[in-house]
Each structure stands twice: as C-alpha cells, then as structure tokens.
Image: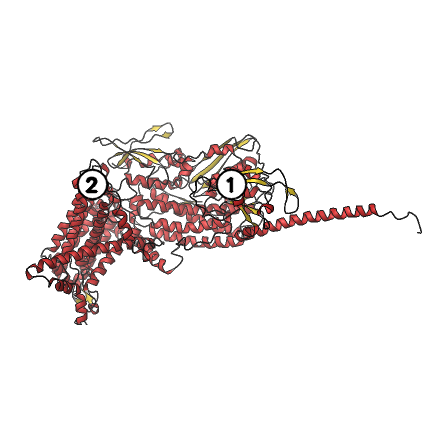
C-alpha cells in the first residue's frame, strides 16, 4: 500500500471520528429527547398541584362549568305575561316545521284566533310537538321564525327512562316565560324585546294616527259647516 | 426484506399495488382488524393477510358509518343541508360549513362581505389548529404513550371549543356559515378571548414539541415507516398534510386563492421523505403557520356587515347550473359539487371528502410493514369515519 | 444519635416483635415459627403495597396528564383497589374449551409463587432479611427466570395462536434483557466479592464526609444502574417495553384468555415483580437500607429501603406516562446491539476500577471511558437506523 493511500485511509477514519465528535449539541446523546420529554411531564405533574391552569378538571356534578350565553340545546316556545296559553307568541305559521332539517316539529293550527301582543287577531297552535330525540339543535327554526316565538333553551340534563314519550315535548312542556328567556339569554332577549316594543310602538302610532283621522272626520261630519260669506 | 425490495408494476398511469411474495412456509394469517378496535379511529375494518408479522395484503372495508348524507341533501333545501355538513368531519365542523357555503355561493354568484371573510378565516384556522393537535395526540396514543400528549392536546382544544360555543352556540356542530356570510356577529369580548387563546397557542406547540419531536422512540417508530412517494400520492389524489409531507407543494389556499387568503403571509411546510414522522412534523409546522394567520387576521378585522343584505334565507331557488367549491380543510381538499335544477332542493349533492381519498393508498403504504406499524400508518393518514362514510 | 436506644428499637421493631411472638413457643419450634412469621409479613405487606401502587399509578398518570385520577372510592380514591378486587373476584372465570386446563390454572400460580420467593433474600432493613443465603443473588435470579416459565405456560395452554405469539414475544424479550440484568449485577459482585445481598448492603453502608458509599455514585455503578434499570423495565414488561401486552395491538398478549381472578393474579404478579426487581436494584446500587447521609442514620432502615423502592416505582410510572412503546424488533435490537455491549464494557471498567486502587485517577479514567463509549455507540446506533433530527423546507 502506498503512503498516499495509507494517508487517505487514516484521514477517512479521522473524518469519521470528527463527525462523531461534532458538537451538535442537539444530537449529542441517544436519550436526550427522552429526558426532555420526561422533564416536560414532570413539570406537568408538579404543576397540576400548584396552578389551576394545569389541572383543568371540573368535577361534575358537584362542580359545573357555567353555560355559555349563546349555548343552544333544544327549542322552547316563548310566552309573554303570566298565562302561557294566552301569551304564547307562536301563530302557527308552520315555517319552522317546513324548514326543520330532521322534521322533528309537528304543528296543528287552531280554527279560531286570539289576540297577540299588539292586539291583532292571530291563529295559535293547538298542538306543537317537538321530538327532542330527533332534534339536532341546529337552530334553523329560531332563525326563520318571523314572530320571535321559538328560542333555544340551555338545559341538557334531560335524560329519562321513558322510551316512548319521555322525549316528546308538547306545547305545554315547551312553553317558558319571557322572564326565563331573559335569564338564560339576557342580551338576545333584550334585543328581541326592543324589536317587539318597536313593532308595537309603530302599530300603536299607526292606530293613533288612524284614530285621530277618524275622529277629525267624525267631528267634521257632526259639526255644521260655518255659514259661508259673512263679514270679511 | 425491507420495503425498498418491493416490486412495482406500472400500468397505464396508475401504479398497481406492489406485490410481495410470502416467504413460502406456512399459509398466510388472515386477520380482520376492526371494526371494533381501539385504534381504528371509528368503525373501520382492515382485512389483513399476514406472513408472520409482515403485511402481504390489506383490504380496507368501510361503510359502517354511512348515513345517507348525499341522498338526504337531495331531499331537503340548501339551508337544511348546512347542519348536516357539520357532521361530516365532526371534528372540523366550521371548515365543512365553509366549503358548502362556498359551493352554493359559487352556484348563485353570491358576494360575501369583508368582515365575514375575515371571521371565516379566523374560525377555519382555529379549527385547523385543534384538528392537528388532536390528530397528533391520537397518533401518539396509538404508539402507546398512554394518552399524555393526547390530554395536552385536548386541553388546548377545549379552549378553542369554548370559543366556538360562545360564538356559535355549540362546541362541535357549529352550523355557523350561511350563503353570503356568517350567522352571528363576533363581539369585542369574544375577540379579546380569542386573542388570549391565540397568545397561548405558541407556548402549547412548543411544549408539545419538547415532549415529542426529539423523542428517540418516536423517531425510531416513525422515521422510514409508511413512506408515500410523491408520484403515487399525486396519482391517487391524495391532498392535505399527507401530500405535502411527501414533498408536493400543493395547498388549495395558495392555488385557488379562495376567500381572502391572499392577504395573509404564511408559508407551506413540505416534507422530504413522506413517512409518518414527516406527516407529524408537517402538521406541527402547519399549526405554527395557522397561528401566524390568526394573529394577522385578528389584527386586521374590519367593521361592517357580516351577511350580504341581498342574501335570501328562505325560498332560496338557485338557477339551474352546477358548481364545485373546495377549500383546504385540515385533512385535505374538501369539495362540494352541486347541481341545481331550479328547484328549492339540489338535484345532485356530492361531497369529495379528503379522508376517503387519502385512504385509498393505505395498502400501498402498509405493505411489508409489521402489524404494529399498520396501526401507526393508519393513524398518520388522519381520517374521520364520518367523512369516509358520509 | 445513632446510639439513641429509642431509634435503635424503632429500627429493629419488626425483629423485636417477631422475637417476642416466637418466644411463646417451645424452643424446638422457634426457628420454623420465626421464618413463618416472616413469610406471613411479606405476603401481607407486598400485596398491600401493590394495592396502593395501583392507585398511585392511576393518580400519578392522571396528574401527568393534567387530570385527577380516581377520587370517588374512599378518601382521595385510596379504596379503589378494594373496588377493583371485588370486580375481578366476581367476574366469570372463563377457560377456553380446548385449553389445557391444568397448565392454564397453574400459570398464574407459578408466577405469583416464584415472585414471592424472590422476596426471601432481599434485605429490607438492618437484620431484616428472611433467609441470609451466601448466594442470595443467584437464588433471586433463578426465581426471576422461573417467572418467564409462567408466561410461556399461559401462552401455550390457551391454545390460541395469538396468545402463543404474544407469549413467545414476551419470553424472547425477557430472556434478552435477563442477560443484561445479570451482567449489570456481576459488576457489583466483582467489587463486593460476595453474592450475599446483606454483605453487599453492608459494603455500601459506609460514609466518608457524610456521603454514602453507594455504588450508584461511582461511574461504573451509575452505568450499571442505568443498564439495570432499562433491563428491569423490560423484564417486567413496562412501558416503553410493553408491546407484549399493548392495548393498541392486535391482541392482548399472553393473558388474552384469562379473566376474573386469574387475570388479577397476573396483574399482581407483574407488580410484585416490579417491587422485587426494584428491591434488588436498590440493594445492589442504591445502598439497600442505608441512609443517604450519615446524620440521617437515626431514621429506621426499613423506611429507607421502602422509600427507595417506592421512588423506583414512581420512576416506572413516570416513564409509562411519557414514553411511547418500542416495536418488538426494535427493542430486541436495542438490547443486543446497544445495551449488552455497553454492559460488557462496564464490566471491563469495573475491573479497571478495582485494580487501579484508590485515588482520583480511577474516577477520571472510568468516567471518560464510559462517557465516550456511550456517545460513540449512541451515534452509531442512530446512524445505522437512519434516524435523527431533520429540517424542513417551506414554500411560499
């Protein structure tokens, strides 16, 4: 073997040892990644005793997370005032029944009418059933309702052992007062109330204007016209 | 025999699955993995033929979660299909919503206001972060780390889901996008909460990486396993992080310029080897890029309406025509193909889901590997059975 | 303070108790009765520790994962093992039709009995070893090997090709790491010059400047302890070496066909093996029952022994919570290509240590050899497997 090839061989060996000793600190040891991982879990272990950030368990049912204000679970019917039948906002237009994707709403319209919150005569539902086991909480019924009559509730602890009707709610079970609506969705309920009050004010203003016009016309008809001519 | 010794047969543009000869002694062990199995991400079955420990044949069998999504779509209005899209890829409901809304908006030529576009981007990137975190968590769980990274990922995910709940009303089934914008406007407290969550995300990704990326056991199990060659990936229609991990630069956000993604500075991470480790790292890097997009979007959010005032909610009858709307969902390219015949319901409603298409090359990736590796390769594809079976 | 009679009595309290109880019997029966009492003590204490460890494991894993472990049964969940025990006792005992019923029944019994026998030679405190054998270490390893027999019996008798596969994998793993375990302890035997475990502890129970002479504080001892720890994790089938009983694998391994109380016995056997191997590791490397500092020798010796064993258990739990599991061929590779050569090198270094005599030179030489070997072999291993850190490119 010539000296040059011997030298080349020795140099190649040196290059090999060089690459072994390269101080690439991240690659230095077999096992440093494992140690880093174990340090991380140890940090979490001790941290879970000390900081609330680390231990995020909420021990249900003794502790509960407060529900978000916008949470939606299953629908309910809103009524104004104290009497749920008289104050129900639903006018049985059946739009929600048509738009509901899984078709879980069943409505039967009444034959007669009852006055609504502005005094106009409206139909009302004699039957309003929602099969809550079919409902998928999509909130489309709320979006399309023109009368602010159906809203989403936040109660989810509805488990029952009655297979054949425990989760079929009729209109009495679905009705909740406007105060309840305010308690679960305050911002939304205030907006709805403001809108309805505006509507009512508009209707009342129109009614007043119409009444004034009618009174003026009646007054004009009742009083005799003043004599034509006379002094200048 | 290593994976590189596999013979491949080229047939007219489509690479036939490679053939592995069994060693000759003894018959093949035929085993069905699933549908009832802790690692199959849902109800999914794999019919494996094993020669000792190596996989010689793999036939995926799915359909256990088929829920008639597309036929249902034909029977109800366009709006009523929106909550059903939540349930396709049930982990990422907001991106499903966006893809569908995009398809319908293309069908009718609907404009979307700027504020709504920004909100869509914010929610989509939040979805991407929590999807990648959970997907990595599940992958490591299957590797046997008894759920520790999974729990960390889920802790972060809970914060994002709380944001979704306070905005849309529901943690997972958000039903938020509408044709022409978004359903509910974001409030200032929500934006503050989001900023706080986004500020905590880089710390979380760093901790996640500290636990995992340099872990030698992870490297030993993931590097060189389940290699997907880029030509095969393109041929099979694979998209998403799987495609980018094989080195193909294709991100629908950069290709289609849908929404307002052009306004954001973000990069697309690419892998070189196409193995499980690359897919895992591409997902981590994509999480970091998503955080960058989120910070930019939250800064630049303009005021304005969130819904096009001309958009109709009820009585929506698009003119006859067809449209294909696609987005870069966290798992890949999610597309909706709609044919309208002028009526209130679509004539044909088709979903092109990334999980199903990405699953078609599972056999090619798994041949020659051990059973233990099959579980990991399957986990690295990141599928959700709701999407695969629709 | 070490001579304080109160603390001496506290240290020897179990010995004194036994002597007092045995004193009631005639002289001829006394040795037998003494041993019997010792056996009863071991059979009561260690399963009790096992019960406590199952709770600690679940709570420890929970805290690592930022959640609370079980906390409903009893205060802080401490009565959870009672609930688990009742559950496993009341489950139906299913024996497969074609299984070999006798062997199927014997397998868990063999496991539990041989593991208990291993406890007989561990010195759990000053004068607290059940049988003071001259070749105690040899006896311990003989019993340890017998546990592998029970694993194979379980897999074979189930007449199920999957559990046979799992059993064969488990036995192969245990045999490979048994070699490493033995060679790591041979280093200790070389330095001490005796196979008797009480003598090994006595050799470590010396202090200079208040610091103990535990073997872990020497370079060869640290290396030996690390290889012993890796081998111990593999012997007891714990993470990251728990593929034979992996939950996300195809089958549940060799105890697939076991249910009810027999499964509980396998579980008990696994944890007792963990205690026994930790006990041996403590005795060989961590000084057994000796206190960490000379001013702490007044604390009872059994407290130190059990404290160190529980610390080892905590490290086992910590590793389980952090590390994913290795594939079977990878862990066999790891054993034969990395750990075993390193252990053999450690033997050479131990010999070097002994023959270089006292002084700072032997510290430097031994440390340098071991660290260099670790770095070089580690990088060779990583290079041959083609894995390592990577960098990623981005597209705009």
Please indicate whether residue C250 sits to the left or right of residue B63 in the image: left
Q: Quadrant of the C terminus of chain C?
A: top left
Please indicate whether residue C262 sits to the left or right of residue C73 in the image: left
> Are discs 2 and 1 located on one and the same chain?
no
Tell which subunit mark 1 falls on. A
What crowding class fits label 1: few (fewer than 14 Cα within 10 Å), some (14-19), or many (20 or more)?
A: many
Instruction: Say whether residue C224 is visible.
Output: no
Instruction: Give the SS element for disc 1.
Output: strand
Please indicate whether residue B76 sits to the left or right of residue C268 in the image: right
Q: Which residue ends up furthest to the right in the rendered image?
A: A231
Instruction: Say whether residue C5 is visible.
Output: yes
Residue C75 or residue B136, whichever sits in front:
C75
Residue C281 in the image: x percent, y percent? 19, 56
Q: Residue B22 sits in which quadrant?
A: top left
Residue at 67% in and 50% down: A201
Which mark is in front, 2 or 1? 1
Please indicate whether residue C384 sits to the left or right of residue A144 in the image: left
Instruction: Give the SS element for disc 2.
Output: helix
Q: Say which mark, if any, is on residue C5.
A: none
Residue at 62% in and 48% down: A196
Residue B242 in the image: x percent, y percent? 38, 40
Residue C368 in the image: x percent, y percent? 20, 58
In this figure, which residue is indicated by the disc labeled 1? A130
Seen in the picture, residue A67 relative to C207 is either above or below; the reply is: above
In this figure, which residue is indicated by the disc labeled 2? C155
How far apart marks 2 and 1 lie (CA) works out to: 56 Å
Q: Quadrant of the N terminus of chain C?
A: bottom left
Residue C29 in the image: x percent, y percent? 7, 59
What crowding class fits label 2: few (fewer than 14 Cα within 10 Å), some (14-19), or many (20 or more)?
A: many
């Amino acid at each position: 073997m010539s000296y040059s090839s011997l030298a080349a061989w020795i140099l190649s060996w040196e290059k090999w040892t060089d690459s072994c000793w390269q101080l690439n600190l991240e690659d230095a040891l077999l096992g440093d990644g494992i140690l880093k991982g174990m340090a991380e879990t140890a940090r979490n272990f001790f941290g879970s005793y000390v900081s609330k950030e680390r231990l995020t368990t909420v021990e249900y049912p003794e502790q509960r997370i407060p529900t978000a204000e916008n949470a939606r679970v299953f629908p309910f019917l809103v009524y104004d005032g104290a009497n749920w039948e008289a104050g129900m906002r639903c006018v049985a237009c059946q739009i929600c029944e048509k738009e509901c994707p899984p078709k879980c709403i069943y409505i039967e319209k009444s034959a007669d009418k009852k006055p609504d919150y502005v005094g106009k005569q409206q139909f009302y539902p004699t039957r309003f059933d929602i099969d809550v086991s079919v409902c998928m909480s999509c909130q489309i019924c709320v979006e399309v309702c023109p009368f602010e009559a159906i809203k989403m509730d936040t109660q989810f602890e509805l488990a029952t052992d009655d297979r054949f009707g425990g989760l079929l709610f009729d209109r009495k079970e679905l009705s909740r007062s406007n105060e309840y609506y305010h308690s679960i969705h305050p911002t939304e309920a205030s907006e709805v109330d403001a809108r309805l009050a505006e509507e009512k004010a508009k209707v009342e203003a129109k009614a007043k204007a119409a009444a004034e016009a009618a009174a003026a016309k009646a007054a004009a008809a009742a009083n005799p016209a003043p004599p034509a001519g006379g002094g200048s | 025999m290593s994976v590189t010794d596999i013979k491949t047969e080229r047939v007219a543009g489509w690479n036939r699955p490679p053939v592995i000869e069994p060693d000759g002694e003894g018959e093949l062990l035929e085993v069905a993995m699933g549908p009832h199995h802790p690692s199959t991400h849902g109800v999914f079955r794999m019919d494996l033929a094993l020669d000792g420990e190596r996989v010689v044949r793999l036939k995926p069998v799915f359909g256990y979660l088929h829920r008639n999504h597309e036929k249902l779509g034909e029977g109800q209005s366009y709006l009523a299909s929106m909550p059903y899209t939540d349930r396709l890829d049930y982990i990422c409901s907001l991106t499903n919503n966006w893809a569908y809304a995009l398809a319908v908006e293309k069908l009718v030529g609907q404009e979307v206001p700027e504020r709504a576009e920004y909100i869509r981007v914010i929610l989509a990137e939040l979805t991407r972060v929590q999807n990648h975190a959970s997907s990595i968590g599940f992958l490591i769980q299957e590797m046997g780390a008894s759920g520790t990274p999974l729990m960390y990922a889920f802790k972060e995910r809970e914060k994002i889901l709380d944001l979704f709940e306070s905005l849309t009303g529901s943690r997972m089934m958000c039903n938020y996008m509408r044709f022409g914008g978004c359903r509910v406007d974001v409030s200032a407290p929500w934006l503050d909460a989001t900023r706080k969550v986004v500020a905590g995300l880089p710390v979380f990704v760093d901790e996640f990486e500290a636990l995992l990326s340099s872990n030698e056991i992870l490297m030993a199990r993931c590097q060189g396993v389940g290699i997907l060659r880029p030509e095969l990936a393109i041929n099979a229609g694979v998209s998403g992080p799987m495609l980018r991990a094989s080195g193909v630069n294709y991100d629908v956000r950069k290709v289609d310029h849908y929404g307002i993604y052009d306004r954001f500075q973000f990069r697309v991470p690419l892998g070189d080897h196409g193995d499980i480790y690359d897919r895992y790292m591409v997902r981590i890097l994509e999480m970091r890029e998503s955080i960058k997009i989120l910070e930019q979007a939250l800064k630049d959010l303009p005021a304005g309406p969130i819904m096009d005032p001309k958009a109709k909610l009820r009585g929506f009858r698009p003119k006859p025509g067809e449209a294909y709307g696609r987005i870069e969902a966290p798992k890949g390219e999610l597309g909706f193909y709609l044919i309208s015949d002028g009526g209130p319901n679509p004539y044909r409603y088709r979903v092109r889901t990334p999980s199903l298409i990405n699953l078609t090359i599972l056999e090619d990736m798994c041949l020659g590997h051990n059973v233990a590796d099959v579980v990991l390769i399957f986990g690295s594809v990141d599928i959700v059975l709701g999407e695969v079976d629709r | 303070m070490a001579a304080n009679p109160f603390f001496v009595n506290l240290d020897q309290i179990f010995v004194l108790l036994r002597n007092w109880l045995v004193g009631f019997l005639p002289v001829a029966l006394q040795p037998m009765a003494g041993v019997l009492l010792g056996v009863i003590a071991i059979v009561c204490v260690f399963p009790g520790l096992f019960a406590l460890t199952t709770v600690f494991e679940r709570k420890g894993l929970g805290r690592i994962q930022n959640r609370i472990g079980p906390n409903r049964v009893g205060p802080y969940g401490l009565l959870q093992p009672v609930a688990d025990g009742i559950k496993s006792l009341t489950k139906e005992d299913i024996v497969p039709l074609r299984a070999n019923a006798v062997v199927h029944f014997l397998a868990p019994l063999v496991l539990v009995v041989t593991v208990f026998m291993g406890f007989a030679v561990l010195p759990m405190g000053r004068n607290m070893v059940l049988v003071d054998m001259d070749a105690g270490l040899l006896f311990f390893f003989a019993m340890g090997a017998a546990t592998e027999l029970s694993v194979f019996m379980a897999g074979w008798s189930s007449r199920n090709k999957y559990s046979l596969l799992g059993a064969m994998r488990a036995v192969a793993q245990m045999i490979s790491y048994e070699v490493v375990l033995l060679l790591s302890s041979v280093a200790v035997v070389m330095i001490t010059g005796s196979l008797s475990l009480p003598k090994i502890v006595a050799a470590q129970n010396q202090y200079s400047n208040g610091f103990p002479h535990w073997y872990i504080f020497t370079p060869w001892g640290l290396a030996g302890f690390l290889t012993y720890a890796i081998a111990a994790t593999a012997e007891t089938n714990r993470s990251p070496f728990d593929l034979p009983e992996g939950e996300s694998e195809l089958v549940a391994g060799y105890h697939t066909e076991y249910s009810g109380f027999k499964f509980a016995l396998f579980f008990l056997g696994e944890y007792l093996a963990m205690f026994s191997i930790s006990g041996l590791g403590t005795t060989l490397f961590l000084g057994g029952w000796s206190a960490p500092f000379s001013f702490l020798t007044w604390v009872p010796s059994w407290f130190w022994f059990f404290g160190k064993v529980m610390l080892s258990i905590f490290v086992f739990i910590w590793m389980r919570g952090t590390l994913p599991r290795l594939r079977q061929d990878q862990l066999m590779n790891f054993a034969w290509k990395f750990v075993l050569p390193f252990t053999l090198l450690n033997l050479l270094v131990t010999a070097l240590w002994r023959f270089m005599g006292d002084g700072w030179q032997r510290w430097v030489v031994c440390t340098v050899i071991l660290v260099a070997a670790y770095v070089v072999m580690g990088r060779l291993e990583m290079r041959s497997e083609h894995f390592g850190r990577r960098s990623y490119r981005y597209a705009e």
